[in-house]
Image: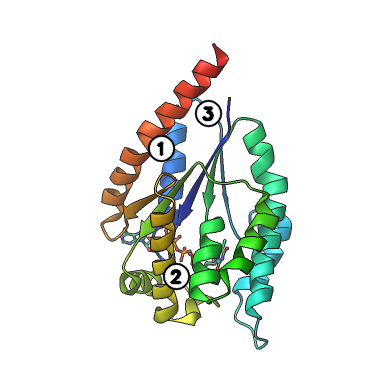
Amino acid sequence: MQGRLITFEGIDGAGKTTQLQWVRSWLADAGWARSLVATREPGGTGIGRHLRSVLLQVNDEVLDDRAELLLYAADRAQHIAQVIEPALAEGQWVLCDRFTDSTFAYQGFGRGLEMGLVEQSVRMATQGLQPDLTLWFDVDPEMAAKRRQDRAGGGTDRLEAAGLAFQKRTRQGFQELATQFPGRIVQVDGNQELEAVFVIVKEILEPRLKQWLSEDLMEVS
Ligand code: Z5A
């Protein structure tokens, strides 16, 4: 049985973390006969959690944009080696909160780093591993900012503090990636109520998961 990598992407406050948790429960409860791993970037490993706090904490010292890019790459290389690849090798379905598209959208489009550099860092970390499917939760940046403000106990991290113009550039980045990879990245209208978004997510996932299961069966027979 072949492992599959499904990534959840979007600007901060797009709702991807909530939807990932709902998908995880739905898949487990509906008996899709496949073990699951839910994980995230940055911070999907012990080492990654250290890197996450360096990346997200607001600090007196300014983190250089290229240093930031390399820290995301380091987090990803460790995450793939320690969590994602072993799970895929066992035939598991891996649900990952953010992956390479975030690097292109945030460091490339948001920060404005040269795309060649971003690509190099992604290639070094992934060695060519790509998601089988990416759900891009597309929300209006103003609405996403309001959700983050409303979130109980929510402080502002370093990237959120970069402001609305940064989030708009990042959203534009996801838009361009979705145009570039139409088979892999599926846009989900995240502006709707949580439950309505989840209905769309299930409509996208169901046929894909069935297709993957039937491909596995064909391989076995
Ligand atoms: N980053 C990067 O720059 N480069 C990279 O390569 C990678 C990451 C991998 C941490 O990511 C940061 O890392 C992130 C990008 C950068 N920038 N920041 N900041 P993260 O995923 O850990 O953090 P986040 O994106 O800020 O997560 P988030 O704020 O938790 O957003 P979310 O996961 O999209 O949303 P949520 O947690 O599901 O929902 C947020 C709130 O909105 C919550 O109260 C929900 O109940 C509410 N919500 C969600 N959906 C709805 C709907 N549909 N209606 C109403 N309310 C909703």
Res. 152 in view: no
Nearer-the-camera pick, 179 or 204: 179
- Up-down: is 38 above or below 125? above
Which numbered disc flags the more N-terminal residue, 2 or 1? 1
Determine contact: label 2, label 1, CB under 8 Å: no
Residue at position x 65%, y 85% in the image? 62
In this rendering, which labeled residue sits more in front, label 1 or label 3?
A: 3
**In which quadrant of the rendered view does residue 139 lie?**
bottom left
Neighbor class of circle 3 (other Cα within 10 Å; few <14, some 14-19, many 20+) is: some
Image side of residue 168 versus residue 104, left or right:
left
- Up-down: is 54 above or below 63? above
Which residue position holds label 3? 34
Residue at position x 50%, y 25% in the image? 33
Q: Position of residue 182 (x, y in %)?
A: 39, 49
Q: Which amino acid type is marked by label 3?
A: Arg
Say what secondary structure mark 3 lies in: loop
Say what secondary structure mark 2 lies in: helix
Q: Position of residue 34 (x, y in %)?
A: 53, 28
Q: Which amino acid type is marked by label 2?
A: Thr
- Distance, label 2 to label 1, CA atoms, is 30 Å
**In which quadrant of the rendered view does residue 166 lie?**
bottom left
